[in-house]
């Protein structure tokens, strides 16, 4: 109440009351979003308690629990496992393969020289990438590391990659890849109160990432060793080259740690998992046939008594027994049994699970048909579902290639040129020259076809119309290499002619026509 209202309350109480009521009416009158989502008066929204926070409060402070629950769902709920592995398989598959694409025009190279240079670099990269020596742990090759990094990214929200230099015999390249699980990037105990360190990420005055704090021991490990942290600068001070690759998907500005992909649907998945387990157990119990024997004069050594002891779940509790297939259980004097009918299978189970799965699939950008691997709709509907899913798969593939594959390839190329295994004049003198040499495309598994004949015809039409190339269509249809296919086909056709299988094109057409008529 302001000063004027207080004066009115003393001199004219009725007028003061009228003014107070009028002010309350004005507060009720809404405008803009206060009519709708921001309304504080609608009954449907009165019980909505929401608190806002920065990216740190909303995301970083809750990450530990989100990671643990996300990984638990992956290990115990089939739908969660399927969602993550489906995304991994379609985005990465057997690994994104390198296709060097240098800027030949800028470098003053002919097409033949560019092709020869690209083939040599791809051959050198294959020497390193196909070997487990590219892994600091010597467990996986480069393509398996892609799968592992991406899977960790999905489950934990982010994955940190170090690029140490480790010399090993019979391997000319010393670059190594070391994957660090998200939990190990954390704030040291003695720096918990520093505002410039967010969940193990040190930031600068302008919000830029300066360094990462990596613990030697996993925070969830049972080891008794004392934990210590190592500060790893994000970029080299003199070269500016990355020391750390941080794989994550940002949701908000000023966000420095990623969120597990299952975070928005953790509750739905957990409840659905519990419901499924309950229905499964009820169905198992419903399928059991157990006979209860009631005796008026029980005697020791009865057959039923022997089976009763064997069927007891807990020997310490005489009243605990479990149902079994064809089990016989004896009842004591004065005891009776009431039939327990769980009424399974539940006819509403499939419809309910389907409805919840559709919502989960929508949140994860995976159509329901692909999420459960069940295509029962028409060709058009199934193809539309695949196309929608592949929008997400391609987006995430582009992220993986940009954040992981390309930076690793550029570091490899630096070492290859420095050691003289690859010739690249001006590579270390001009950043534009280095960028021209470092161009690459990363190809993954193809989308697949529901009706291969229609897809191939459409691909031919795109090539003939100039909307696409044979190289791109080969990648889309089979994930193969058109240049290699072409060279192989030339060899095959030459061998067929030399073997007398094909005399000329006209004879070939006549032979094919006869074969069709005979069929």
Image: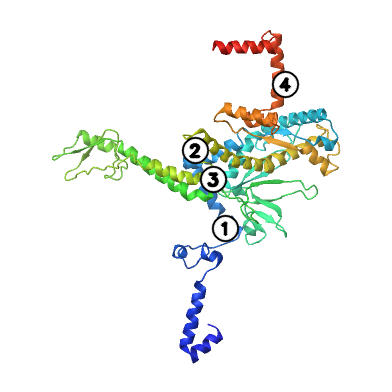
Residue 288 vs residue 8: left or right? left
Q: Earlier in the sequence, mark 3 or mark 4?
A: 3
Determine whether 36 is above or below 392 in the image: below
Label 1 secondary element: helix
Q: CA distance from mark 2 to mark 1?
A: 33 Å
Label 1 vs label 4, nearer the camera: 4
Density class for disc 1 (Cα within 10 Å; few <14, some 14-19, many ≥20) is few
Instruction: Say which residue appears at 72% left-offset and 41% top-offset.
Output: 407
Farthest residue in the left direction?
Answer: 297
Q: Which residue is mark 1?
A: 58
Whether tag 3 and tag 4 are in contact, CB under 8 A, the answer is: no
Density class for disc 2 (Cα within 10 Å; few <14, some 14-19, many ≥20) is some
Label 3 secondary element: helix
Q: Which residue is mark 4?
A: 487
Q: Position of residue 111 (x, y in %)?
A: 81, 30
Instruction: Say which residue appears at 51% left-offset and 75% top-offset.
Output: 26
Q: Position of residue 212 (x, y in %)?
A: 68, 51
Q: CA distance from mark 4 to mark 2?
A: 39 Å
Whether tag 2 and tag 1 are in contact, CB under 8 A, the answer is: no
Residue 106: quarter of image: top right
Whether tag 4 and tag 2 are in contact, CB under 8 A, the answer is: no
The disc placed on residue 364 is 3
Q: CA distance from mark 1 to mark 3?
A: 20 Å
Q: Earlier in the sequence, mark 1 or mark 4?
A: 1
Label 4 secondary element: helix
Q: CA distance from mark 2 to mark 3?
A: 13 Å
Q: Which residue is mark 2?
A: 369
């Amino acid at each position: 109440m302001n000063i004027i209202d207080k004066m009115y309350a003393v001199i004219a109480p009725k007028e003061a009351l009228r003014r107070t009521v009028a002010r309350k009416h004005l507060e009720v009158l809404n405008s803009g979003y206060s009519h709708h989502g921001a309304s504080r008066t609608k009954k449907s929204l009165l019980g909505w308690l929401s608190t806002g926070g920065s990216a740190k409060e909303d995301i970083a402070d809750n990450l530990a629990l989100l990671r643990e629950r996300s990984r638990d769902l992956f290990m115990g709920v089939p739908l969660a496992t399927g969602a993550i592995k489906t995304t991994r398989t379609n985005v990465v598959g057997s690994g994104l393969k390198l296709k060097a694409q240098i800027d030949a025009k800028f470098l003053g190279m002919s097409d033949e020289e560019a092709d020869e240079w690209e083939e040599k670099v791809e051959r050198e990269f294959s020497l390193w990438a196909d070997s487990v020596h590219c892994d600091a742990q010597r467990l996986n090759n480069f393509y398996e590391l892609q799968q592992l990094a991406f899977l960790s990214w999905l489950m934990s929200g982010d994955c940190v990659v170090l690029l140490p230099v480790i010399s090993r015999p019979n391997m000319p390249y010393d670059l190594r890849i070391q994957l660090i699980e998200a939990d190990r990037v954390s704030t040291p105990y003695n720096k918990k109160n520093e505002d410039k360190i967010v969940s193990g990420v040190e930031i600068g005055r302008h919000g830029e990432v300066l360094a990462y704090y990596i613990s030697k021991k996993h925070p969830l490990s049972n080891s008794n060793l004392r934990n210590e942290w190592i500060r790893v600068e994000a970029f080299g001070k003199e070269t500016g080259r990355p020391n750390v690759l941080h794989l994550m998907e940002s949701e908000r500005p000023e966000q420095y740690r990623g969120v597990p992909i299952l975070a928005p649907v953790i509750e739905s998945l957990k409840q659905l998992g519990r419901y499924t387990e309950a229905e499964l157990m009820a169905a198992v119990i419903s399928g059991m046939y157990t006979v209860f024997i009631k005796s008026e004069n029980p005697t020791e050594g009865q057959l039923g008594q022997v089976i009763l002891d064997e069927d007891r779940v807990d020997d310490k509790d005489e009243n605990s027994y479990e149902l079994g297939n064809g089990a016989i259980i004896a009842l004591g004097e004065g005891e009776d049994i009431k039939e327990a009918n769980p009424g399974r299978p539940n006819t509403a189970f499939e419809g309910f699970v389907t409805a919840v799965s559709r919502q989960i699939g929508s949140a994860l950008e995976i159509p329901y048909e692909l999420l459960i691997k069940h295509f029962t709709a028409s060709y058009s509907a199934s193809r539309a579902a695949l196309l929608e899913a592949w929008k997400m798969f391609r987006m995430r593939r582009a992220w993986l290639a940009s954040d992981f594959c390309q930076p690793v390839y550029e570091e490899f190329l630096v070492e290859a040129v420095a050691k003289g295994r690859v010739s690249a004049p001006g590579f270390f003198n001009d950043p534009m020259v280095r960028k021209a040499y470092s161009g690459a495309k990363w190809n993954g598994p193809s989308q697949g076809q529901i009706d291969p004949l229609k897809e191939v015809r459409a691909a031919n039409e795109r090539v003939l119309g100039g909307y696409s190339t044979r190289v791109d269509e080969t990648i889309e249809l089979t994930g193969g290499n058109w240049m290699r296919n072409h060279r192989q086909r030339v060899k095959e056709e030459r061998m067929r002619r030399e073997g007398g299988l094909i005399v000329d094109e006209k004879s070939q057409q006549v032979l094919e026509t006869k074969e069709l008529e005979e069929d």
